[in-house]
Image: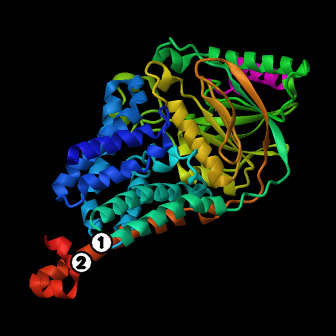
Amino acid sequence: MSTWAAAALGGLLLYASFPPVGMWFLAPLGPALLIVAVRGRSCRAAFAAGAVFGTAFFGPLIVWLSNLGVLPWLALTAVQTLLVALAAMLLPRLLSLRGWPLFAAAWWVAVEALRGRAPLGGFPWGRLAFGQADAPWGEWASVGGAAALSFVTALLGSLLVYGVTSWRGGHRRSSAVASCGVVALVVAPLLIPAAKPSGRSAVVAVVQGNVERERSLAEQARVRGVAQNHARQTQELADAVRRGEVPRPDVVLWPENSLDSDPQRDLELGALVADSVRQLDRPLLIGAILDGPAGQSYNAGQLWLPQQGPVASYAKRQLVPFGEYIPARSLLGGFGALQLIPRDFAAGSSQAPLIAGPVRLGDVICYEIAYDGRVRDTVLAGANLLVVQTNNATYERGVQAGQSEQQLAMARIRAIEYGRSVALASTSGVSALVTPDGRVSDRLGTWRGGYLVERLPLAEGNTLAARLGTWPELLLGAPALAGLATLLRLRRRARANPPAADLKRDPRLTNLLS
């Protein structure tokens, strides 16, 4: 197989492991084929192979972004591809080291760490871990978080290449070692003790009001009917409770942007929310644009209690560049759809859970579900139920390419990672209820109104992944840096000594000088 074919096929197979295709078992083949494409190649050839791989992966993965225009889709694809291509220049050198499957998996973790932080706060979408909720090795997320699950998935692909090449080279023992490694990685999660249930649970209701799909972006940005849609579905839920068709929920959840302004300033919206709270006589979490001091605006979740009104709120901390704020606004703010964003949102600072009786809601708004730290902070602050408030209508309006399904896949991994139930509330779908083992217990599809009601476990205590924090990412990514440092040291030695004499002392230089 040629370099370009291997790189392109690897990117496409990795894409197919994510929703909407969802063939999770293909994920290890992505790293495996990238290794095949770059092994033994020059830095320039590795860069080109990385570019082909990145384009084949990110292009279809985020094609839903083309609903905002072709340019944003192409631009983000290009940025992510460039990061992968630049990092791929280092990969052939790491593959020349003994134990290179470990270094290759570490390289993958390091690249994901870079992508998740830069530029402009990063874009963690498409991490290997996020497509592995159904994999038998998915439980690794509870041990070392998404970073550990990505490492294991990449290592499976690396061991596959190592085993095949060793077998072809007549090294049967090395091939057997690789096979044992694969078995160990797959079987080990079965030995991880299941989290002990707290014995506490709560009936959780998610309301999906829906929006009109045919509306333009400008109309979607200012539509007020969304709030009425959610109030209407809440009324139907209350009627179903009175008829005994569903249990009375302990807490009701509306999605992000279910209100388009501050209900404490907009008396009409405030009355609508208050009436919805009275219908069920239960706490209600809404999604609203809240006004702050000095003209600031926050994309927030706000908790309303019966007889009390709004008592607490969570403001989104990880804002979306070019969606919730515009970098270099003076230069770029007048272009295309960016004109629909008249002002920047302010970022929140608190990760404290919202208390609704026995339920301590850890609110995570839309994009934040992809960021390890944002989710972990609210878990460590005491949340016993995770809530993802989201509005995906813009990204599903025309080209439906799985954005909401990809977000649900992330929510499932977070459930496993932190041992928490997750409620995903979306304006237009997908909405879902997820148990702590990552299983989707109920869901609503896109472009329909409705509600979900389910009794979900409330967690106590923290998984090992929650307690370890960023350490797994640091420790698992460090071998890649250590390997590169070793290579630099060896190259300096090679330049300082005659090659023939130096090779006698350190056979690892053979790959560097050939």
Quarter of the image holding residue 455?
top right
Q: x and y percent of residue 27 in the render?
A: 44, 47
Q: Is residue 47 visible?
A: yes
Q: x and y percent of residue 413 in the render?
A: 59, 47
Magenta residues (range): 260-279
The numbered mark at residue 97 is 1
User: Looking at the image, which residue is at 60% across and 25% down?
Assistant: 429
Name the chief secondary structure element in magenta: helix
Q: Is the residue under label 1 in contact with that under label 2 (CB below 8 Å)?
A: yes
How packed mark 2 is, by other alpha carbons closer than 10 Å (few <14, some 14-19, many 20 or more), is: some
User: Looking at the image, which residue is at 16% across and 54% down?
Assistant: 44
Which element carries disc 1, helix, strand or loop? Answer: loop
Q: x and y percent of residue 440 in the render?
A: 67, 37
The numbered mark at residue 508 is 2
- Considering only order in the chain, which callout, 1 or 2, is on the residue closer to the N terminus? 1
Which element carries disc 2, helix, strand or loop? Answer: helix
**Type of residue at label 1?**
Leu
The vertical placement of 22 against 265, above or below, is: below
**Type of residue at label 2?**
Arg
The vertical placement of 172 against 446, above or below, is: below
Q: x and y percent of residue 85 in the render?
A: 27, 50
Distance from the alpha carbon under mark 2 to that under mark 1: 7 Å
User: Looking at the image, which residue is at 48% across and 45% down?
Assistant: 25
Quarter of the image holding residue 297?
top right
User: Looking at the image, which residue is at 12% across and 88% down?
Assistant: 501
